[in-house]
Amino acid sequence: MGCSMNVSSYVYGTSFYHRFDVRPKLIATLAFSIIAFIVSSHAGLLLVFLIPVLIMLLSVGRKETWHCYSRLLPLFVLIILFAPLQERSGEVLFSAGGFVLATREGAESVLRIIARLGGISGALMLLLLTERNEMIIKGLRAFHMPYNAALAASMILRFIPYLGELFAEIRDSMSLRLEEGRRGYPILPSITALVVASIRMIPETASSLEERGFGLRKKAAGVALKRPEYYLIQWLISAIILLSLLILG
Amino acid sequence: MAEKNRTALRISLIAIMTAIVAVFTLVIRIPSPIGGYISLCDAAVSFVAYAFGPITGLIAGGLGAAFADLIGGYPQWAVISFIVHGLEAFLMGLIVKKGNSSVAMRIVAALIAVIIVAGGYLLLTTAFGLTVFSEAVLEVPANIAQSAVGAVIGLVLYSAVRKAYRGLDNLRW
């Protein structure tokens, strides 16, 4: 099928980060994203960028790491091109004909933005690359995410690939209706067909939920995830890395 | 319908509409006359707001755009997309009443969508430190074009779907 959407980012592996429990992973990712905005020293910012890169290299290899970071390169280029022009006061690093091209403050601003952007994106991608969607939902439930919200989240993650494939089928069949020699597909009829098909699913899905006992069973307060080996050590490692980063920053 | 059944229906509605917004954002792209592509995220967000009102619009529009960012490899934008597109759908849903709003109200809703998307991304990407103001300003024309095209396509899509599926208004809450 001609659907180009990559729905699940999970990459199978047995690395140390794959074996990490989803709960410390979720908390560490969230804490890392917050700390990235607190850190301001050069060493701290360098670590914000490098920690996810290193863990990603060790967990999913060079190819996947490059694939993840290559998508950020155009943004980095834009930031490098335009950020120094905004910060033109301070110590001049480059100038042309009296026009200030870059100052030390501008260069530092670029590095700060790139470190945060790369670090936070890397940390979140690392979570998605090393954890299955179902486990992320279970992890959220373990932190007492409301039952209905967790149910909706798991349904969304199932419907996105399904509707992506359905659209590819509709698009392919619609393209056959075009006159000979014309390429592409009629956009409005295709998206209308997709939306109508999706809306027809809503009452059927609601009935399926009821048939499976929705609203009848007592909702569990949380999900009992098994404690893996070295569970406390995993929390400890996460805490040490994050505290070191905070102290350095 | 009993309250229990309504809850199941609401969860199904939100899950499927969120998936629709994500699929429109990730998969469906129209080539732009000035190069590149226009994503149909705003068309889906506008459709959800027109068809199902402000609450479904807020949740499905915001979550759908955020899921698309998470899955599409731009997780750092997820929170901003949730705020911008959630607010866009919420305000559009408030302005446009159940299928019988005037043309003037629909134009007002489209203008609000354009302001929220262009202004929201400009302010929030700078405030969150994801970019600098001078670079964020460069994105404004593209965001205006995308949200304006999206609002119009969303309205056309709503009219087409309403004709094809008679029970559409019964799903609104």
Image (cartoon, rainbow, N blue to C red):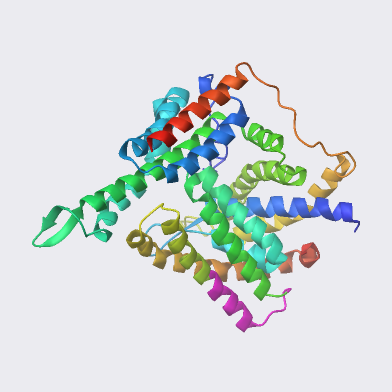
A112, A20: nearer the viewer: A112
* Overall secondary structure of the magenta section: helix
- Residue B171, given in percent of the width and then of the height, sits at 78, 62
Please say if B132 is above or below A205: below
- Residue B143, given in percent of the width and then of the height, sits at 45, 64
- Residue B20, given in percent of the width and then of the height, sits at 63, 53
**Residue extending furthest toward the top:** A229
**Residue extending furthest toward the front:** A247
A216, A200: nearer the viewer: A216
Q: Is residue A189 left or right of residue A33?
A: right
A222, A1: nearer the viewer: A222
Question: Is residue A176 visible from the viewing direction of this image?
Answer: no
Q: Is residue A179 left or right of residue A66?
A: right
Q: Please give the name of the residue rendered at 48% of the width and 27% of the height, measured from the top-left corner.
A: A240
The answer to if B99 sits in the magenta stretch is yes
User: Which image quadrant is residue B133 in?
Assistant: bottom left
Question: Is residue B124 visible from the viewing direction of this image?
Answer: yes
Q: Is residue B134 left or right of residue A20?
A: left
Please say if A247 is above or below A106: above
B160, A75: nearer the viewer: A75
Q: Please give the name of the residue rendered at 62% of the width and 65% of the height, measured from the top-left corner.
A: B89
Q: How many discs appear?
A: 0
The magenta stretch spans which residues? B98-113
The answer to if A230 sits in the magenta stretch is no
Q: Quadrant of the C terminus of chain A?
A: top left
Q: Please give the name of the residue rendered at 55% of the width and 70% of the height, measured from the top-left corner.
A: B113
Please say if B104 is above or below B149: below
